[in-house]
Image (cartoon, rainbow, N blue to C red):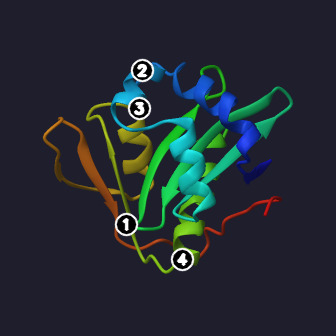
């Protein structure tokens, strides 16, 4: 099931984010980048960010975040051991649908080159659009397909 994230999900999201192998960041490293639970919750409450979660029988399996201000999808993470079950694709669809509902025709993101994540996005039609100073590749999706609604059982 895909639903919108809730404040009480923050602990599970942090646990997933700090458990991944690719693009791993610790809580301290996230804080150094200005990513804190309080900041994320404030941005969600302000309507600038949206978070969806995929739930299975064991709880939260993954999540993405989307930023309505610039059309960025970021933070698409699936818990180790939960990969390959379709969670990532459904979560990406929800994130893109949310952006589309807020007037974005396209979307962008960054990821490390040569990773499973990069292959995931390229297989879904995202195109390379340069490199950032930190070595991440910028990927763009020129048109968000209309067939990608933000499916949610939450508000």
Q: Tell me how far mark 2 sits from mark 3, CA to CA.
A: 25 Å
User: Which residue sits at x=47%, y=71%?
Assistant: 144
Q: Residue at x 65, y 42 (%)?
A: 86
User: What residue occupies the far left of the structure in this picture?
Assistant: 133
> Is 88 rendered above or below residue 49?
above
**Which residue position holds label 1?**
70
Horizontal and vertical percent for residue 146?
57, 77
Q: Which of marks 1 and 3 is nearer the N terminus?
A: 1
- Relative to 23, 63 lies left or right: right
Q: Gap in Å between the C-alphas at discs 4 and 1? A: 11 Å
Mark identifier at residue 28 = 2
Q: What element carries label 2?
A: helix
Figure check: 152 above or below 79: below
Mark 4 surroundings within 10 Å by alpha-carbon count, few (fewer than 14), some (14 through 19), many (20 or more): few
Q: How far apart are marks 2 and 4 (CA)?
A: 32 Å
Q: Which of marks 3 and 4 is in front?
A: 4
Q: Are marks 2 and 1 in contact (CB under 8 Å)?
A: no
Residue 102, disc: 4
Mark 2 or mark 3, whichever is nearer to me = 2
Cα separation between marks 2 and 1: 26 Å
Residue 5 percent across, percent down from the top left: 70, 48
Q: Which of marks 2 and 4 is nearer the N terminus?
A: 2
Label 4 residue SS: loop
Disc 3 secondary structure class: helix
| Res. 23 in view | no
| Number of numbered tags placed on the structure image | 4
Picture quarter containing residue 34? top left
Residue 116, disc: 3
């Amino acid at each position: 099931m895909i639903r919108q994230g809730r404040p009480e999900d923050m602990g599970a999201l942090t646990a997933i984010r700090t458990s991944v192998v690719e693009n791993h960041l610790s809580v301290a490293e996230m804080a150094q980048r200005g990513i804190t639970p309080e900041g994320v919750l404030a941005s969600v409450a302000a309507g600038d960010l949206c978070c969806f979660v995929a739930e299975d029988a064991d709880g939260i399996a993954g999540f993405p975040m989307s930023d309505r201000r610039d059309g960025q999808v970021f933070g698409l993470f699936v818990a180790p051991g939960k990969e390959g079950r379709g969670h990532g694709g459904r979560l990406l669809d929800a994130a893109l649908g949310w952006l589309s509902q807020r007037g974005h025709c396209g979307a962008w993101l960054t990821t490390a080159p040569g990773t499973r994540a990069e292959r995931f996005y390229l297989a879904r039609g995202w195109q390379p659009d340069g490199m950032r100073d930190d070595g991440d590749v910028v990927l763009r999706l020129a048109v968000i397909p209309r067939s990608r609604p933000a499916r949610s059982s939450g508000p």
